[in-house]
Image (cartoon, rainbow, N blue to C red):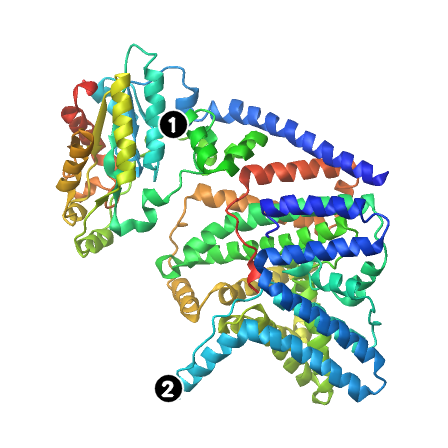
Amino acid sequence: MLFNSLHFLIFFPIVYLLFWTLGAKSVKVQNVLVLLASYYFYASWDWRFLSLLIIITAVNYFAGLKIEESENLKRKKQILAISITFNLVCLGFFKYFNFFISSWVSLFNIFGYHMDAGTLNIILPIGISFYTFHTMSYTIDVYRGMIKPTKKILDFSCFVAFFPQLVAGPISRARDVLPQFSEARIFNFEEAMNGFVLIFWGLFKKLVVADNAGIYVSHILRAPHLYSSSNIIIVIFLYAFQIYGDFSGYSDIAIGASLLMGIRLMQNFRQPYFSKSLSEFWNRWHISLSSWFYDYLFNAIVIAKRDWGKAAIVFGLMVTFLTSGLWHGANWTFVGWGFIHGAGLTLFFITAGIRKKIGKFMPKVVNHAIGIAFTFSYVCFSYIFFRSPSWDIIMQIFHAIGRMSFRPFAVEFFTLGKIIVYISLLIIADIFIYFEIHKKVLKTVFAKVLVIILLIMSIVIVGSFQGNQFIYFNF
Amino acid sequence: MKMKKFLLIIIIVIAGLFVFDRLIDVIIQKTLVVKSKFHFSRYVTGKKAKDIYVLGNSRALNSFEEDLAEPVFHKSAMNMAYGMMDMQMVRIIALDICRKAEKQPQKPTIYIEVSALFSDPNFKGHDTKTIAILPEYNMYADNFPDLKEYYKKHTPGVYYTNLFFKCYKYNNELFYRNFEFLKKSDADWVLDEVVNSRLIKSTEEMKPFSFSLDSTRMVYMKEILETAKRSGVPVNLYLAPYMPEYLSKIQNLKQVTDSIFHTTGARVIDLSALFDNDKCFADMFHPNRFCIKDLMEALKEKSGPGAQ
């Protein structure tokens, strides 16, 4: 069930009305409704994987309790290791089994050993990368003593399966979200209005910006060797806004739908393309994932290797981003993307002092503009690896760019022009949000209603209704 | 209490949408559709019927220029063709022309470029059969009863969304074309480019191939011809020129045009070999501006009595 589908348009209002009518006075009824709705939502993708979701929930629930019960640190560690291993095995089997098998076969073939290993016809359970990360953060936080495990399996199941965030995040922390399922949600008009605006803003980003840009991105990157350098470069910039509109749009809808049900999820994007450095970019892009990796992987590495000094940070960055690349998909192109970001951050880290000194000789505005332009260009460069399904396509893209041919765009200027207009609207809105002007603009209920109507009308007239899936569903 | 207020807001949003939607629709109709020189808009807003209508895909669109045709035919003309136009849409427009013609003493003539009937093995992705006529023509659903009926039958989602949102009909390429043709004229469809040597060379290297006729499209064609006959509207089928190198690779053009004749009873005016100069083409199958006048004259000369 896609957020941008008729199915969801019927499903969500029903759940919403039941939630605030039947569940108005009882937290238990609210949670039962949330859980049933979430399982229905998940089963609508593929009911067979509902059992996997339930098993992962149960294992982590009991692991949390057992960690708390154990007084022996070694025992706690063992239980944590078991639960993490279980999560990773589930993730590894469904997402990476075929990838590793075929990679091993390729590796052996390179050295002249001809292996013939079969792969399995494994279907990737949607959202598995997200909900295994939810549950792992819970057990790790319980182990670290940052939260108390919940005894209520209903609350915990709601936290894991909560439908707005189930299949593509944001990857919430148990310490932020779980307590919200233990308290009765009381209807808050302000939050409901904000949630309402966010849902349509998210749909606008997805249907108007991302999906319209996506038509041309897919068209040209299907066979990049046929197009000129200028076409390829323009399309990579378009892709930057496609993926931003797509994923941040999804996050806005998820956060908005959650707010309507009285649950506050963490912000996932904060105008990432206004970042002045790569490290700032990662504080603004897919915040829930980058902070997850920061908390549970990078920090752990840096602490474990603290004797190494600065090398520990470099090592931590590389491991974190290579893992993050692999998290995005079972393909070496994603590992390449992770490497580019790891290497870029390392370079930023090593040259921090020099950059600061150079920056002092420049006016602040110029320094910031250069930073934004450089960071955006570098991120776009990394998208070549992120977007390409194979290394062949990556090579074709570089080859096409290297030709330095500057023919006009492959589609009519008018067609490209309309996409540029939609992207400009997104950038203008981001400027408003960056400088917090939107808070003044959206102060009154009337303004919010007007914005909602304008967003819906824009979607109706210029939105793409081809039923495109959200890009991050593949991860 | 707050919940009630929120529900009231939702009702206000729905009511606001209803009002805004109708308002925007009226504004677009008055400020864009009426003023645009895009041919579909001219067709639905024009008060006076034309003497000649041209239908088909991009080969029809680029092979018939109204401004040049009118002095040659001594009649008013409108090229209603569109890139990748499906035979289903050709049928819908043709039936509409026939329906309107029944009330007119002066019957128009319809020219149909027949390559919309073929499947070209070299352009499977561009095969008009694979291009759904939706939602591209939705903008004019209110103007063509058969189109509306088609949506109701085959894509109820589009049909019912149209009922709620009047502005949904603008969600297609044709809406943007209306903007584009505020300044441009339909004469601008005709191409200025001359085919490049690389394309000529790659065409020469192509393997010979055959067209295939699609039976469903032939059924539409038969229906058009029968309805037109009942309405007293003459229909001329023609085949626009192909670049000589491309034409030489087509193995069964004669069989295909003969087959159209045997199935429908209408003879195809074959202009496929009209030009032996590559400079008359923008690419393999689209004539360009430089020879279009000769094409108009040849079409007039070989046309049936309807064109006289």
Residue drawn at (30%, 33%), measured in percent from left and top?
Answer: B220
Using the image, tell me which numbered label, if any, was put on residue A409.
none
Mark 1 vs mark 2: tell me if same chain.
no
Residue of label 2: A114
Residue A60, image x, y percentages: 73, 73
Q: How crowded is mark 1: few (under 14 residues within 10 Å), some or many (20 or more)?
A: many
Work out whether A301 lies above or below B131: below
Q: How far apart are marks 1 and 2 (CA)?
A: 64 Å
Viewer-proximal residue, B197 or B47? B47
**Residue under the point 80% across and 44% down:** A21
* Drawn side of residue B198 relative to residue B89, left or right: left
Q: Which amino acid does label 2 sit on?
A: His
Residue A336 screen position, x and y as percent: 52, 73
Helix, strand or loop under label 2: loop
Out of A96 and A448, give the one closest to the viewer. Answer: A96
Residue at 55% over, 37% down: A461
Task: Specify whether residue B123 is in view.
Answer: yes
Residue A357 appears in which quarter of the rendering?
bottom right
Q: Name the subunit of mark 1.
A: B
